[in-house]
Amino acid sequence: MTRVFKFGGALLKNASGIHKVISLMEEFGCEPLVVVVSAIGKTTNALEQLVELRLEKDKTALVNNFYTLKQQHLQLAMALFAEGNRTLIEAIDEEMSQLWEDLNNSYRDNFQAYDRIVSHGEKLAGILIEHAALAKGIALKNVPATSLIVTNSNHTNAGIDWVNSEIAVQKTIPPLLHNGHVVLTQGFIGSSREGEITTLGREGSDFSAAILASLLQANEVTIWKDVPGLMNADPNRFPNCVKFDALSYHEAIELAFYGATIIHPKTIQPIKKSGIPLYVRSFYNPDIPPTCISNSAHHDEKLHSIIVKDAQVLLSINTKDLSFIAEDNLTRLFAAFSRNKIHINMMQHSAVSFSVCFDHHAQKLSQLLTDLEQDFEVKYNTGLQLITLRHYTPELIAEITAGKKIFVEQRSRSTFQVLVYNSATT
């Protein structure tokens, strides 16, 4: 029985979390096991900040933030090995030296730079987990994800080359599993056919686990989380949320698409094709029955879901000559969003106007405005919040929207979305 486990960065943020991952490897490693890890804690955020400082040419802040990140990983290494571990310290030093070199390199564009720089987070996590596991006597092999996941060159959101990825995975992983090794690899990152490091989209480690499970024809995928399972709302926002016992692949894809952060939007597709069940399981209370995502749709409409996305932008676009927002103009608009790698969360259009909602990213928004203002009149609002209700009721809509300033709303038979002013951001 082959399993694929994925551990997120929030679970790896301290020595006790890493030790718990190692204990789960010991518990389940008697059968073929592949472990996928994310960057620890808030490392990805810190690396993204380094990317921004590099663009701003703020050398002082860049140096300070770099050494802060290095010190965090060294402190975690020392917490893992109170007596010290020279090999681990040297490995972290080497990886951080490569990061510093990458921060000072020249790149074709900012997207290529992002992938190269941010990928170091997962590599550092792999180094820490590898040394902790080997110290416990676990037969473990750390296999770089860049040697397994082959992608196209669409930096920051790379597409998978399934044929070449399968060749790479089948050549490498099954022999290691057959010889009794636990295979450790990194989520979120891959490598293009040209050998450039790529990433699969923010929070893409779940997707990495699903890719490997599909290519290995694994028996199951488990995503370990700091919640009891997949909840119908964020427990940090809604005190009375409920855990799903089971969901269909279709419903899970819908929830992920609308922004349920517990699962990456692309995770379900590869395992659905192979019929591999996905379990969302409690890291701190593993005896709690997990949420099972499979072909069965029996439970899908028994609970409503509430999904909230903060830091949203509402961009309203009008034609300057009152020409219709029809095929030609829509093609140009979508091309601009695609070129700037902006995912649209909600949209509406009338005869001469087009309104879209998307995640706020200052640099991307600035470039998008530059692209559009040549041909269109544009205005925008920031600091908004997008709320999505699945399997809503009139009472739930009234409760969620009470007292809120509504900018846009739309509904279908099963989904209600509303864009509101988020006073918490001001």
Image: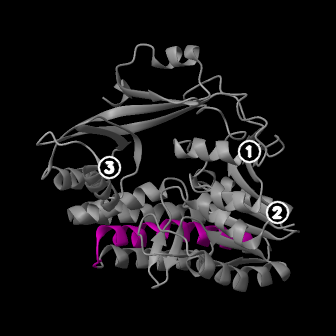
- Which marked residue is nearer to the observer: mark 1 or mark 3? 3
Q: In terms of image quadrants, where is residue 196?
A: bottom left
Q: Look at 31% across and 61% down and name the residue there.
A: 339
Image coordinates for residue 125, horizontal then vertical, percent: 58, 66
Tags 1 and 2 touching, CB below 8 Å = no
Label 1 close to label 3 by CB (< 8 Å) = no
Give the percent coordinates (x, y) of residue 230.
Answer: 68, 40
Q: Residues within 10 Å of mark 1 (few under 14, many from 20)?
A: some
N-terminal of the pair, mark 1 or mark 2, is 2
Which residue bears the numbered disc 3?
A: 361
Three-letter residue code for mark 1: Tyr
Secondary structure, mark 1, is loop
- Residue at image position (36%, 72%) is 112
Q: Amino acid at mark 3?
A: His
- Identified by mark 2, the residue type is Asn
Residue nearest the viewer, comparing 81 with 320: 320
Identify the residue at image location x=38%, y=59%: 48
Residue 164 lies, in percent from the top left, at 60, 82
Q: Nearer the viewer, mark 3 or mark 2?
A: 2
Disc 3 crowd rating (10 Å Cα; few below 14, some 14-19, many 20+) is few
Q: Secondary structure at mark 2?
A: loop
Most common SS among magenta residues: helix
Q: Is residue 408 left or right of residue 78?
A: left
Q: Nearer the viewer, mark 1 or mark 2?
A: 2
Q: In the image, what residue occupies the spot 45% across and 18% down?
A: 401
- Return the x and y of residue 320 as percentages of the image width and height: 12, 42
According to the picture, the residue beneath numbered tag 2 turns out to be: 219
In the picture of the structure, the residue carrying the numbered disc 1 is 284
Which residues are the magenta region? 106-133
